[in-house]
Image (spheres, rainbow, N blue to C red):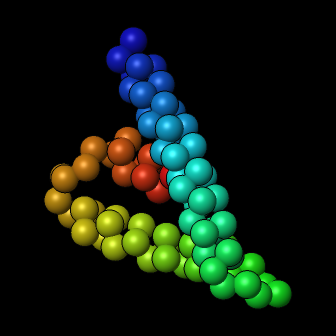
């Protein structure tokens, strides 16, 4: 029925966003690591910190207004 279809679409959004996010993080981390060589994984730390900050801004900006459907908000959080 409709509920199962909604869950399937939400799962699809999460899978697509997760895959896109993983690829974007991989390339951004490699790009940063090549430019800032260090003993610690500086690129990984920077990508995660910036990504978390941008996600928080996006979710806060769209929290009160129904700008994004719930399944898209979930997918963005997962990606």
* Residue at position x 60%, y 59% in the image: 27
Seen as rendered, the residue at the extreme right is 39
Taking depth in this image into account, of 27 and 10 the one nearest to the observer is 27
Residue 32 visible in rendering: yes
Work out whether residue 33 or residue 64 is closer to the camera in this orientation and state it.
33
Quick check: 46 left or right of 74? right
Image coordinates of residue 69 in percent, x first then y, are: 27, 44
Q: Judge left or right: residue 78 versus residue 36.
A: left
Up-down: is 15 above or below 22?
Answer: above
Asked whether the viewer can see residue 78, the reply is no
Q: Nearer the viewer, residue 24 or 57?
A: 24
Q: Which of the 4 image quadrants contains residue 43? A: bottom right
Toward the front, the furthest residue is 35
Q: Is residue 17 above or below residue 45?
A: above
**Left or right: residue 69 compared with residue 23:** left
Give the residue displayed 25% in from the left and 49% down from the top: 68
Image x and y of residue 26, in percent: 64, 58
User: Is 70 drawn above or below residue 57 in the view shown?
Assistant: above
Whole-percent x, y for residue 6 in the image: 39, 26
Residue placed at 54% from the left, 56% from the top?
Answer: 24
Please give left or right for residue 36 compared with residue 1 in the image.
right
Residue 53 on image: x %, y %: 44, 77
Q: What residue is drawn where x is 25% and y is 62%? A: 62
- The quarter of the picture where the N terminus appears is top left
**Front-lying residue, 76 or 4:** 76
Q: How many marks?
A: 0
């Amino acid at each position: 029925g409709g509920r199962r279809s909604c869950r399937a679409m939400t799962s699809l959004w999460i899978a697509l966003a997760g895959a896109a996010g993983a690829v974007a993080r991989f390339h951004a981390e490699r790009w940063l690591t090549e430019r800032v060589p260090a003993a610690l994984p500086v690129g990984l730390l920077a990508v995660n910190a910036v990504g978390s900050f941008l996600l928080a801004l996006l979710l806060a900006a769209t929290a009160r207004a129904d700008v994004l459907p719930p399944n898209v908000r979930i997918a963005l959080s997962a990606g």
